[in-house]
Amino acid sequence: MNTGQNCTFNLQGPNGTVESPGFPYGYPNYANCTWIITAEEQNRIQLVFHSFALEEDFDVLSVFDGVPEQGNLRTRLTGFQLPAPIVSTGVVLSLWLVSDYAVSAQGFHANYEVLPSHTCGNPGRLPNGIQQGTTFNLGDKVRYSCNTGFFLEGHAVLTCHASSENSATWDFPLPTCRADDACGGTLRGQSGIISSPHFPSEYGNNADCTWTILAELGDTIALVFIDFQLEDGYDFLEVTGTEGSSLW
């Protein structure tokens, strides 16, 4: 078995760059690389991706809120969609890239910046949308809207609020702009929002939408309904999983 391309990077300082080996010409097969970014006390770390392309589902970049241990896993990134910025809750943010035996893509390029602990950091821009708000400190709000032909899925206004004595976080996840005639998709990450097309307005006729939520092996998924109104007897939502299916 090939032992692969092992690499470890320890990064410090107010800002810097993180990129996959060989970027932009493709990372090696059997890559096993770790980046550990450490800030000084009373700070946190913001990571902003500028380019991202990994062979979907086979090559994975895991991001940890702290040292790279399973209990600190924040999200697993794969595929070709640019991830939203990630902000640590503490002074360490780690990345772990693993690639398989064949097929690689361009890889990723990101910048990190050390922030004071009382700021939320930039929640991210929306593809096919508009971000209003340029400061990201306690009490600040960021408003999102979508370009013509797209509708907003999620919360339009995010507020930076205190999450603990020395930290701050946005009150909701970043929304998405979905094409008018599109619905469904694959969702990863620790939390998120699913809503019917055009919610809170009425959904269209003949809709057929499937959302797939992926979690780590051994984890469970909690689905909590905040609003629910479908035409009784004619429109249905089916929820399926390893425990079987439920029909509403």
Image (cartoon, rainbow, N blue to C red):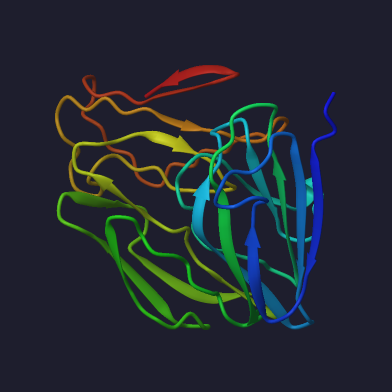
Q: Residue at x 48, y 48 (%)?
A: 192
Q: Nearer the viewer, residue 243 or 167?
A: 167
In the visual, does 113 lie left or right of 150?
Answer: right
Residue 243: x percent and y percent?
59, 18
From this viewpoint, is residue 234 visible?
Answer: yes
In the visual, does 192 lie left or right of 117?
Answer: left
Residue 131: x percent and y percent?
32, 69
Residue 206's place in the image compared with 164, above or below, is above
Q: Nearer the viewer, residue 23 or 55?
A: 23
Residue 181: x percent and y percent?
19, 37
Q: Nearer the viewer, residue 219 or 55?
A: 55
Q: Residue at x 39, y 81 (%)?
A: 134
Residue 232's place in the image compared with 24, above or below, is above
Name of the residue lying farthest toward the top: 244
In the visual, does 233 lie left or right of 247?
Answer: left
From this viewpoint, is residue 165 visible?
Answer: no
Residue 70's place in the image compared with 101, above or below, is below
Q: Quadrant of the N terminus?
A: top right
Q: Nearer the viewer, residue 6 or 83?
A: 6
Residue 221: x percent and y percent?
59, 36
